[in-house]
Amino acid sequence: MTSSLRFLWPWLALAMLFAGAPQIYSSGSALTMMSVMGEMIIFALSFNMLLGQTGLLSFGHAVYFGLGGFVAIHAMNAFIRAKVGVPVVIIPLVGGAAGLAFGVLFGLISTRRAGLVFSMISLGLGELVSSSSFILRSFFGGEEGITTNRTKLAPFFGHKFGSQIEVYYLVAVWCFFCIAAMYALTRTPFGRMCNAVRENGERVEYVGYSAQTIRFIAFSFSAFFAGIAGGLTAVNFEIMNAQQLGAQQSGLVLLMSYIGGIGHFAGPILGAILITFLQITLSDVTNAWQLYFGLLFIGFVLFAPGGLAGWLMLHRDAALKRELWRLAPAYGMVAPALAASFAGAVMLIELAERQLALARSEGSAMRLFGFEVDAASMGPWLMGLVLFCGGVGLTWLVWPKVTGAWGSLTSA
């Protein structure tokens, strides 16, 4: 009974979180954001099935997300025209089937080799499909994309999913079961063999397994779940366009996985939540939000290669051993320096962006950290430079304290 409860309580907590989140964040924008988070969680976990579990770095994973969404939205329009009694809840499965079909087709080519060759093939296939989206206008709809109306499909127990709260719960249910299915897949012998292929494909061949077959099956499963995420996106936004299967979408899921942490199953979940939140909120605050994403990615790769999940797991282990008190003094010393360097970097980026805006005749006056400043004057530039350089210098001086604190914790 104790072992069963230990296994079940994280899933019960996740289900309660999905069910109770709209009771806390009930606004329309919050529900839309949480719906997108659910879709991106599935998408990021499907990508991590390739990268984190099997060691395959794909630069074109958005192809299966986008194609699954396009097939799903065409299926919705076909069901509406034929007046077939198919409810909305089935549509993500249509997207998953489309993702699986294209995954099998492209996987037969791309999974013959691993490493850099696989990455380049995935990049080529991604660019091929993305460029074809502007040629095959009858399927992709050109720059305008393809639209639909989910409320015209058959109701599901009286629900036509016209309101955003109903769409959220649809996404939440699919997200929960997809998370459970992908986690269960990692616990199977096949999941263990994927890890073995990631570590040493030649040894897998030596013990009698085909590394190519394992890569192909993992690739197909990954494309299937990416297609489900694309189908949910088609249901949520009722539109699909070429941007959702291009390089930008593939780069976005790469950011989610790396920032969240590819070494942990929960890493892509954390990364999808964080990046989606920043993407929606930062785009309303600054025009340089993509630059912040790039800097955040570089920072995690250089200083926290385990990602957000790895960083949290380190501190969880320290908390379980009741040794976090060893880190508190060092963290208290380095926190002001990091805050100063962060504030200085933000000031310099925003001032530079405002200088570029001068060419667009938007003026030099701007609001920064709650204060009105003039980007054309030297004062804000000097303050930002002093904060950034001073913060970086102080961090460099104090950081050995943090390293020493972790060393004492490890020794203890």
Image: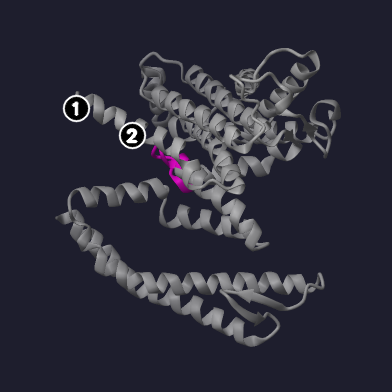
Residue 392 seen: yes
Q: Residue at x 20, y 62 (%)?
A: 326
- How many other residues sit within 10 Å of disc 2, few (<14), some (14-19) or many (≥20)? few
Q: Which residue is drawn at 74% across and 32% down?
A: 128
Q: What distance separates the C-alpha of mark 2 from that of mark 1?
A: 14 Å
**Pointers 2 and 1 in contact (CB under 8 A)?**
no
Q: Does the magenta stretch include residue 280?
A: no
Residue with the mark numbered 1: 2
Residue with the mark numbered 2: 10
Among the 4 quarters of the image, the one containing residue 132: top right
The residue range painted magenta reads: 258-269
Q: Where is residue 198 in the image (x, y as percent from the top left)?
A: 43, 30
Q: Position of residue 399 (x, y in %)?
A: 33, 69
Q: Residue at x 46, y 75 (%)?
A: 340
Rendered image: mark on residue 84: none
Residue 121 seen: no
Query: Above or below — where is 384 with respect to 285?
Result: below
**Left or right, residue 300 beside residue 404:** right
Q: Residue at x 82, y 39 (%)?
A: 143
Amino acid found under the numbered disc labelled 1: Thr
Query: Which secondary structure, mark 2?
Result: helix
